[in-house]
Image (spheres, rainbow, N blue to C red):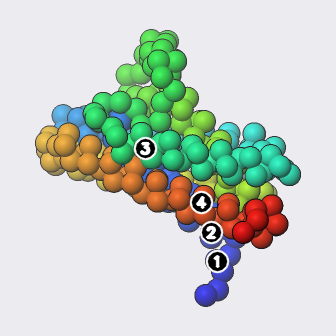
């Protein structure tokens, strides 16, 4: 089977990860659904656009800052192991979620205080700014992207140059944008089309997918260690 060109692979990785991070229900998804039902598709789509822009900004910061420094020597291996642990942790968190009100990627009360201060200071009135500020206040999203970006580069899924990084960021924009736009359309069809129970089930499915990916990632790490002779059979 022929390998995908590096830029196409990076874009595909960005598309999948953009969908994966946007998919689990949380405050921004609930806002889009509720506002779509109340004010229509256009308003919900603009909230989704704001959320997508902030998602892309965080992703861009991750790829152009710490990620490149976390892929050298033993640091590269450490980041791969940390990525496995982090994906497992998030997967379990999604799988055991009891409510769709909680943020899928959060760092406890710290992020809640940050978001509250941002909303108080910026006081968003427009739909676009509502989506932007909601994602901006969740610093856990930035942490998630830093870990993912470091692992993508460490595993050579995204080349550590501008074309590769921008292709991945572009894929994230498309993935997140598609999800939020589709969610806004569903919300505009009428409140209750997606019940809280359905949304929670979606989060559980997302957690299961993350755990499967974590197991594949862990197996890949073990195989790489074995190939390098660092793991005896």
Looking at the image, do the residues carrying marks 4 and 1 touch, with CB atoms under 8 Å apart?
no
Q: Residues within 10 Å of mark 4 (few under 14, many from 20)?
A: many
Indicate the secondary structure of the residue bearing disc 1.
loop
Q: Measure the alpha-carbon separation of dots 3 and 4.
A: 16 Å
Residue 107 vs residue 191, the one in the foreground: 107
Residue that label 3 marks: 92
Indicate the secondary structure of the residue bearing disc 3.
helix
Which of marks 3 and 2 precedes in the sequence?
2
Indicate the secondary structure of the residue bearing disc 4.
helix
Which of marks 4 and 3 precedes in the sequence?
3
Question: Picture coordinates of residue 150 (x, y %)?
Answer: 70, 49
Q: Residue at x 29, y 46 (%)?
A: 184
Q: Measure the alpha-carbon separation of dots 4 and 1.
A: 19 Å
Residue that label 4 marks: 217
Question: Picture coordinates of residue 87 (x, y %)?
Answer: 53, 47
Looking at the image, do the residues carrying marks 3 and 4 touch, with CB atoms under 8 Å apart?
no
Which of marks 3 and 1 precedes in the sequence?
1
Residue that label 1 marks: 4
Looking at the image, do the residues carrying marks 1 and 2 touch, with CB atoms under 8 Å apart?
yes
For this view, does 47 lie left or right of residue 195? Answer: right
In the rendered image of this protein, does residue 111 appear above or below residue 185? above
Q: Which one is closest to the eye, mark 1 or mark 3?
A: 3
Which label was assigned to residue 9? Answer: 2
Q: Measure the alpha-carbon separation of dots 2 and 3.
A: 28 Å
For this view, does 112 lie left or right of residue 154? Answer: left
């Amino acid at each position: 089977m022929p390998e995908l060109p590096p830029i196409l692979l990076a874009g595909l990785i960005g598309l999948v990860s953009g969908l994966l991070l946007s998919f689990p229900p949380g405050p921004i998804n609930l806002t889009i659904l509720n506002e779509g039902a109340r004010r229509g598709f256009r308003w919900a789509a603009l909230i989704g656009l704001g959320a997508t822009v902030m998602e892309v900004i965080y992703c861009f910061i991750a790829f152009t800052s710490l990620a490149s420094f976390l892929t050298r020597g033993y640091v590269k291996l450490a980041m791969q192991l940390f990525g496995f642990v982090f994906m497992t942790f998030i997967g379990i968190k999604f799988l055991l979620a009891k409510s769709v009100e909680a943020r899928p990627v959060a760092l406890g009360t710290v992020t809640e205080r940050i978001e509250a201060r941002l909303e108080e200071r910026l006081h968003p009135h427009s739909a676009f700014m509502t989506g932007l500020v909601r994602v901006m206040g969740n610093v856990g999203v930035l942490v998630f992207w830093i870990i993912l970006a470091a692992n993508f580069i460490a595993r050579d899924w995204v080349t550590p140059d501008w074309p590769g990084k921008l292709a991945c960021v572009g894929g994230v924009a498309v993935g997140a944008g598609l999800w939020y736009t589709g969610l806004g359309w569903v919300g505009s069809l009428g409140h209750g089309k997606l019940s809280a129970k359905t949304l929670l089930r979606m989060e559980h499915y997302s957690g299961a997918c993350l755990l499967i990916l974590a197991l594949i990632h862990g197996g890949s790490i073990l195989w790489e260690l074995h190939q390098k002779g660092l793991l005896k059979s």
